[in-house]
Image (cartoon, rainbow, N blue to C red):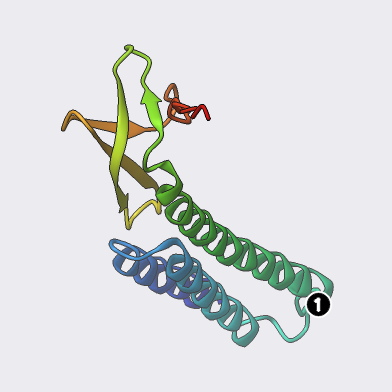
């Protein structure tokens, strides 16, 4: 029994190591879940019939692992939602005055939105009226441009 379980563990971790090198968190969780099921089935097939496994522990393990998988999927969806929200709000920065922590100031003419595929992090880079670029992030102040009012006399 021990050798079959050990073989199943080695197969599961081998699958996990080979499969997660370039995979996203969701697919890694899926591989881990599949590995868990393979290990679980190996335990069931090789258990001692005179001393079977406790079913409440089996169901508890299965439920816990399922919850982790759902949390990973929810985090992935939340990251996607945040990225889409930032992209939607990026257009609102055009025409605004931005000032970074070093005191550099300019009016935003365009915004470049870049998403890191491995971390789902979104980076906003503003091109200013002077032609310089500024990364929009912590320490950057965004203000509405000063408006000039004209009055006409009759």
Q: Quadrant of residue 128?
A: top left
Q: Secondary structure at mark 1?
A: helix
- Residue 35 x/y as whole percent: 49, 74
Q: Taking 101 as reference, is 69 left or right?
A: right
- For this orientation, the residue located farthest to the top is 102
Against 92, residue 104 (above or below) is above
- For this orientation, the residue located farthest to the right is 56
How many numbered circles does the render carry? 1
- Residue 57 x/y as whole percent: 78, 68
For the N terminus, give its image quadrant. Answer: bottom right
Is 73 or 144 nearer to us in this picture?
A: 144
- Residue 112 x/y as whole percent: 28, 48
Q: Residues within 10 Å of mark 1 (few under 14, many from 20)?
A: few
- Residue 62 x/y as whole percent: 69, 73
Q: Which residue is mark 1?
A: 55
Residue at (30% x, 51% y) in the render? 114
Q: Taking 59 as reference, is 101 left or right?
A: left
């Amino acid at each position: 029994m021990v050798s079959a379980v050990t073989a199943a563990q080695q197969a599961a971790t081998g699958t996990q190591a080979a499969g997660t090198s370039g995979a996203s968190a969701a697919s890694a969780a899926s591989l881990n879940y599949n590995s868990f099921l393979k290990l679980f089935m190996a335990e069931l097939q090789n258990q001692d019939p005179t001393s079977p496994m406790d079913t409440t522990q089996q169901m508890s393990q299965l439920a816990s692992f399922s919850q982790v998988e759902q949390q990973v999927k929810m985090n992935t969806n939340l990251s996607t939602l945040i990225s889409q929200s930032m992209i939607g709000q990026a257009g609102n920065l055009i025409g605004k005055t931005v000032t970074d922590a070093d005191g550099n100031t300019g009016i935003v003419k365009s915004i470049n939105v870049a998403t890191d595929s491995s971390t789902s992090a979104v980076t906003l880079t503003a091109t200013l009226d002077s032609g310089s670029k500024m990364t929009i992030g912590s320490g950057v102040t965004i203000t509405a441009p000063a408006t000039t009012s004209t009055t006409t006399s009759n």
